[in-house]
Image (cartoon, grey):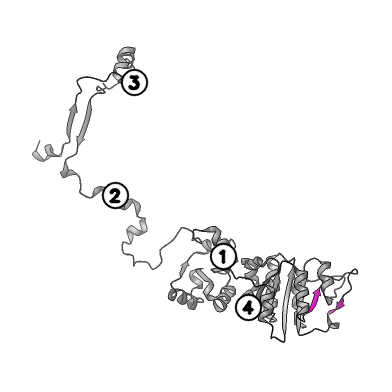
Amino acid sequence: MTDNTEKSKPTIFYAKHSEPKKNSRANKEKSTGWKDKRKNDAFQSKPKRDRNDRIETFQARSDRPRFAKKSIVIELNRSPSEIEHDSPWQKKVRANDQTPTFGYDGYRQRKEETLVYSENSCKAVFKHRRSAIVKLFIIQEMTYQFKELINWLVQERLGYDIVSDEQLNKITQTQHHGGVCLIVKKRIPLTLLNYLEQKSDADKDCILAIDDVNNPHNLGGLIRSAAFYRVNAVMLRQTNLLDSGAAMRVAEGGIEAVESIKSDDFVASLDMLKQQGYQIVALLPCQTKSVASSELHKVQFNKKIALVIFQQINMKLVNCADVVVHLKGNDNMPALNISVATGILLSNL
């Protein structure tokens, strides 16, 4: 053997205790005879060392690389793509398998923030209230159409993520997102008293009072028609329905152009509007013999109007109305969708 071979061998030390412990396992084996039984076992092929012997090995220092352990850990923690591309500038956007999330405080986000998706809805938010934008999720194909928004986010030091279509499906919980999604702060609704103070000097005004319309698609259609015919405000019991992503998508950005008014008591709110000179007009979802109503072309409208819309007829609100209107159908189709009927009525105002 050469000197190098001798140096590379591990050094072995044997430490022998002179007196075993009283309660050691070796003493128990001697007293019970269990150790002798183990020696006769067929599976015991190798002789066992005394349990009081202790072996410590020390590898020669020349055989152990100085940073071997550290380098192994680094290689295990790195992905194959990172090992292949050591420079961070090899790829502009690295693949992110983890689905982006809102953040950490889920309760605060549900209370203060909401999702807006589809192209027109996101552009309307950027046009009317860009200060409410928190973050942007967008697919690569839509970045050119939203380059102005992305540049503004960079200037304001706000975040945006370029994600895949599958990741955007998980974020929005729908496939009809249009390739873009915004996290925005919810709008704070007005009270009717605050709204009337703002419109005290207006000669013309139109308010859409929506009762018992919980379908987000119908609600979005109503808001879209209201924005198209320049309705100034919508009044609801549950204004949080306007924060629905589906309602915003169907409204195509119309929600951003219309004020929202929260009313817990529609009867009291309609009486207040009457005192301010508003004409209360109720639109029936269908013609009924139990309620006296007029056809649309026979009605004279005032300059200030509060238009009451309901999915099911509410007699308390009908009794508050100055004019009750219905759209006459036929035997094939007696009634229209509530959003379509509202659009026809608004076109006649």
Packing grade of label 3 (10 A; few <14, some 14-19, many >=20) is few
- The segment highlighted magenta reads 279-295
Verify whether residue 200 appears in magenta.
no
Packing grade of label 1 (10 A; few <14, some 14-19, many >=20) is few
Q: Where is residue 279 in the image (x, y as percent from the top left)?
A: 79, 80
Counting residues from the start of the chain, the first of labels 1 and 3 encountered is 3
Counting residues from the start of the chain, the first of labels 4 and 1 encountered is 1
| Alpha carbon separation for disc pair 4 and 3 | 86 Å
Which residue lies under the disc numbered 1?
A: 112
Counting residues from the start of the chain, the first of labels 2 and 4 encountered is 2
Please, what is the three-letter code of the amino acid marked with disc 1?
Answer: Glu
Please, what is the three-letter code of the amino acid marked with disc 2?
Answer: Ile
Q: Position of residue 230 (x, y in %)?
A: 68, 82
| Alpha carbon separation for disc pair 4 and 1 | 20 Å
Residue 171 shows up from this direction: yes
Q: Residue 43 carries which label?
A: 3
Mark 4 near mark 1, Cβ–Cβ under 8 Å?
Answer: no
Please, what is the three-letter code of the amino acid marked with disc 4?
Answer: Ala
Which residue lies under the disc numbered 4?
A: 257
